């Protein structure tokens, strides 16, 4: 016969786990699509973007409760951007070791669906330096103010403004070259 030990602390852990699950689930329902779009615009690969966002939510769940729960969305955005940067770094290293005849190509279906203009914008965006691309995506896709962009990227607001301005000029120039 086994003795059953009842812990007074156990209900609190269950309540905390329920709170974390509920809070992260609510955020997931509201923000998943936007975070995937953010990652896709940075890394240009939907499947990898979904993986990065999923991992960001898993990290948030493991860290719950945050000191300031109101900053959970900012935490997720930062985590998604950092995950995207890491993926881009890994890809750059992998490209150094991938023979050109084995390099991956966009599928015909993918290229057809995107449309010529959207494809040009994405290519021009991908050709920008990473920091410029991140600022432009956060500013013009997510409509974030430069102060919030600065917090997410760990730079000053004036640097975010200057990077955005230079990035937008470079993007415009690249798009004009395509026409």
Image (cartoon, helix red, strand yellow):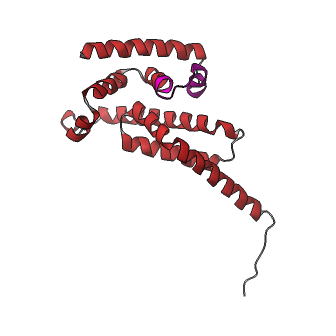
At x 53% / y 41%, what residue is drawn?
Answer: 31
Horizontal and vertical percent position of residue 132: 45, 20
Above or below for 130 versus 68: above
Horizontal and vertical percent position of residue 80: 50, 37
The quarter of the rendered structure image containing the N terminus is bottom right
Specify whether 51 is left or right of 24: left
At x 48% / y 16%, what residue is drawn?
Answer: 164
Among the 4 quarters of the image, the one containing residue 159? top right
Above or below for 18 versus 2: above
Report the span colored magenta. 138-153
Specify whether 121 is left or right of 146: left
Which residue appears farthest toward the right when viewing the image?
Answer: 8
Horizontal and vertical percent position of residue 108: 20, 39
Among the 4 quarters of the image, the one containing residue 130? top left
- Is residue 83 magenta-colored? no
Specify whether 99 is left or right of 21: left
The quarter of the rendered structure image containing the C terminus is top left
Asked if one can make out residue 105 in the rendered structure from this viewpoint, the answer is no
| Dominant SS in magenta | helix
Q: Pick whichever, 18 or 58, lies toward us.
A: 18
Horizontal and vertical percent position of residue 143: 52, 25
At x 46% / y 22%, what residue is drawn?
Answer: 136
At x 30% / y 32%, what residue is drawn?
Answer: 96
Q: Pick whichever, 179 or 152, lies toward us.
A: 179
């Amino acid at each position: 016969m086994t003795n059953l030990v009842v812990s007074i602390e156990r209900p609190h852990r269950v309540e905390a786990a329920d709170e974390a699950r509920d809070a992260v689930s609510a955020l997931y329902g509201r923000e998943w699509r936007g975070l995937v779009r953010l990652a896709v615009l940075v890394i240009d690969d939907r499947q990898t973007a979904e993986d990065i966002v999923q991992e960001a939510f898993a990290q948030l769940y493991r860290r719950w409760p945050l000191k300031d729960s109101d900053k959970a969305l900012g935490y997720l955005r930062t985590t998604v951007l950092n995950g995207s940067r890491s993926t881009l770094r890994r890809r750059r290293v992998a490209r150094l070791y991938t023979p050109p005849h084995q390099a991956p190509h966009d599928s015909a279906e993918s290229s057809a669906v995107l449309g010529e203009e959207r494809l040009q914008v994405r290519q021009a965006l991908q050709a920008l330096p990473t920091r410029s691309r991140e600022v432009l995506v956060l500013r013009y896709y997510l409509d974030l103010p430069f102060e919030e962009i600065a917090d997410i990227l760990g730079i000053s607001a004036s640097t975010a403004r200057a990077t955005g301005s230079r990035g937008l000029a470079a993007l415009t120039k690249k798009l004009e070259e395509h026409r």
